[in-house]
Amino acid sequence: MKKLIVLLIGSIMLMAGYGNAFGFGNYLSDFSIRYPAAGSISNCGLCHTNPSSPGGRNAYGTAFGNNGHNFQSIEGMDSDGDGFTNLAEITNNPPTFPGNAASKPAPVQTTCTSFTYSAFSACQSNNTQTRTVVSSLPAGCTGGSPVLTQACTFTPPVNACTSFTYSDWSACQSNNTQTRTVVGSSPAGCSGGSPALTQACSFTPPVNPPAGSTSVSVNMATGTGSATIETMTGGTNLTNVTAMTDTHGSINQHDKPHGFSFHDGLVSFKVNGVAVGGTAQVKITFPSAIPAGSKVFKVMSDGFHEYDHAAISGNTVTLTLIDGGSGDRDGVANGVIDDPVGVAAATAQDPQPAAASESGGGGCSIGPKANRATAFADSALILLPLLVITAVRTVRRRKK
């Protein structure tokens, strides 16, 4: 009886082992038929965690069992979670195990074909400018041929001007500003910079005296004080009295005197009621005494002219003006004299070097030629008595 029981148990175990062997061989055969190129993974490791001792199933084997033992139905799954579908791993060259996360295809390198860039840099001295890649497509790509340089024309930087020389300030305008222009700048070859071309000032409107005024005071545009203009000719009056600098934009600068300065600027006025073609006398009292050697200049449409019909005394100038003629800027005999005028004082001049002399005798200029002439004259004076004595002796001998 015991022998019968042992024989029965051994038969059962043999049949179970055969069933397992048949089961393994059956699903691997189906796998090989469906995926003939995946022979390298067609073994127990396909579905089991331990290929040498099949027992527990891996993730792919579990999915296979849970889906009716149908390989096709689980091709789109990523059973081992390694980022590749089961089908991608099985059909990869070489195939990898879809149930083993450590076994997966090598990443496929794709070449970048599209780029976005930063802005180009400033042009460099080698006439090129560069940029960088900000992003590229397709995602995860490498390499490609981004365009990172381009040709350009390099312009060397220009030094900005840091020092300036200026013209005189213009007369103060009605907006309480006055202007000037740049005459020179440094360093040499510079450009731009920040020259100070305007400044604030207090505008003094022109004095337009009431009809019939014969004496008007006006503040000088140079800030030196006030001047008084009086018409000395009966029946005449003043209008349009104003003060301006000698650099005012309305003034023609032609023939402006060199070596002279208009300390008080200019005054301008009109004398009305003058007999047509007649004369008028006007006295101008300036803020301070007029220096000796000063000259009076009229400003006509063609520039500055020294005016001879003027008498200077102390701080006053008396002008004799002719309607339509001397001293009348409009040059028309119409009973109105238009008279811009100013006093120019000589500026300090460098003293001229005295003529060099070789001797201080009597203020004479004695040079090499003068020395030779003097020596000749002295020799003649010494020889003259000897010549006379010789001549007298010669005459006496002839008489004997």
Image (cartoon, rainbow, N blue to C red):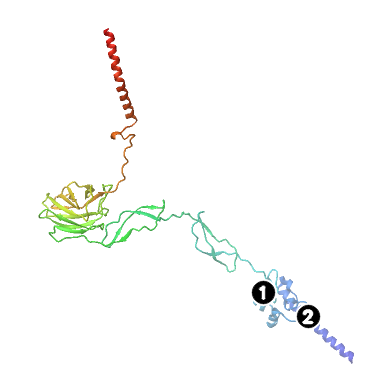
Q: Which residue is mark 2?
A: 22
The N terminus is located in which quarter?
Answer: bottom right
How many neighbours does mark 2 have within 10 angstroms: few (below 14), some (14-19), or many (20 or more)?
A: few
In the image, is 119 to the left or to the right of 301? Answer: right
- The numbered mark, 2 or 1, whose residue comes first in the sequence reads 2
Going by the numbered disc 1, the residue's amino acid type is: Leu
Q: Residue furthest top?
A: 400
Q: Residue furthest bottom?
A: 1
State the residue at coordinates (30%, 17%).
387
Tell me whether the residue at label 2 lies in contact with that at label 1, contact meaning CB atoms closer than 8 angstroms.
no
Query: Between residues 282 and 345, which one lies in front from this camera angle?
Result: 345
Query: Between residues 276 and 354, which one lies in front from this camera angle?
Result: 354
User: Nearer the viewer's eye, disc 2 or disc 1?
Assistant: 1
Residue 262: x and y in percent read 25, 52
Q: Is residue 389 above or below residue 135?
A: above
Residue 188: x and y in percent read 41, 51
